[in-house]
Amino acid sequence: MIRYDVDPADLIARIQKMKPKWIGNAEKRKEEYKKAGKYTGGTEFWAQVKDVYISLQHEKCAYCEMKLAGRRYGSKLHEVEHFRPKSRVRTWPGTIKRLSKYSPPCPTGAASTTGYYLLAYNPFNYAIACTRCNSSLKSDYFPVKGKRMLMEEDAGKFAAEQALLIYPVSNIDTQPEALIGFVGVTAVPLHSAGHEYERARVTIDFFDLNHEDLTTRRAEVVGTLYLALKARGMAKRPHDIHEFDDHIASMISEQSAFSSCARAYLALYRNDPASAVKIGKAAAQMRPR
């Protein structure tokens, strides 16, 4: 999980450039919900700005970092995800079958019948997510350690709520890579205690970030990166070294799938080569041939 770092004013400018009337219409819709005291639906138009987030996130899911299919098929594979649910919030983990024996590291908040309806059209409550992360896992859950701030309208003023999930768009939340790291292909909290640990632990468990499908895909990335680093170390010609450097830089760039895992592996390779080689060899053997 990485941050898609965009200045808040720049995000608004991107939306206005794509849909000049969108911000005004969003404000009107928010006022309707405020008057009603709940989310009342209507003809929804958040999909009108979907391409802004697809571009900003380099066609990647905000949570698992899987690369999606691109704008042509965006309506099917890219979903506009409301970070804080717009109409109701269920308790988490609740009755989720895969988490029937799971114990969260801290309280995860009460349910709400109204949800965060004032954020239904807030651009800083959106992200693009894959169907797995959004529809199958996120749904209308939103665990928090503190008291829900359901009447807050500014997405940048929720610190007291102590959200347990990490919002990756813009700089209004903590850098995800400061909380979640990797041991090989396994996502792990970088802190051993405190709210930083709780956020990382819950985010990993909530989005099932160590599901076999994701660890297998990360293994392909780590294995490929290991072979590139190995070949780079053996290269003699400046041209070859430059090509390997470009390939490695591409793999750890935010445009690439699972770049946070790739960055963590590169750091390990530089700081603990023996461990990195062991992990890299194992991952390379898992790559499709």
Image (cartoon, rainbow, N blue to C red):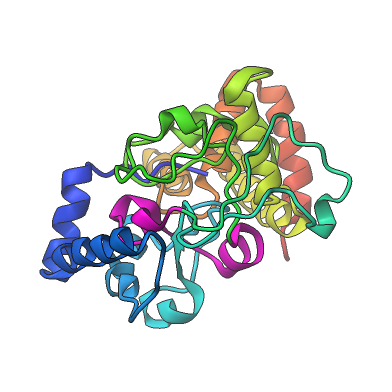
Residue beneath the point at 42% across and 40% down? 245
Judging depth in this view, the residue of 125 and 152 nearest the camera is: 152
Residue beneath the point at 68% across and 18% down? 192
Q: Is residue 155 above or below residue 268?
A: below
The verdict on residue 226 being magenta is: no
Magenta stretch?
116-139
Residue beneath the point at 45% across and 48% down? 247
Judging depth in this view, the residue of 59 and 94 nearest the camera is: 94
Q: How many discs appear?
A: 0
User: Is any atom of residue 181 visible in this view?
Assistant: no
Judging depth in this view, the residue of 232 and 56 nearest the camera is: 56
- x%, y% of residue 286? 77, 55
Residue at the right extreme, as displayed? 101
User: Is any atom of residue 175 visible in this view?
Assistant: yes
Left or right: residue 253 versus residue 166 is left
Q: Locate residue 120: give its quadrant.
A: bottom left
- x%, y% of residue 180? 59, 33
Left or right: residue 228 versus residue 168 is right
Q: Is residue 267 above or below residue 5?
A: above
Left or right: residue 267 versus residue 122 is right
- x%, y% of residue 282? 79, 43
The verdict on residue 135 being magenta is: yes
Judging depth in this view, the residue of 30 and 101 nearest the camera is: 30
- x%, y% of residue 140? 58, 59
Q: Locate residue 132: give its quadrant.
A: bottom right
Residue at the front extreme, as displayed? 36
On the rendered image, what quadrant is the C terminus found in?
bottom right
Q: In this view, does 165 lie above or below 220?
A: above
Residue beneath the point at 44% across and 53% down? 116
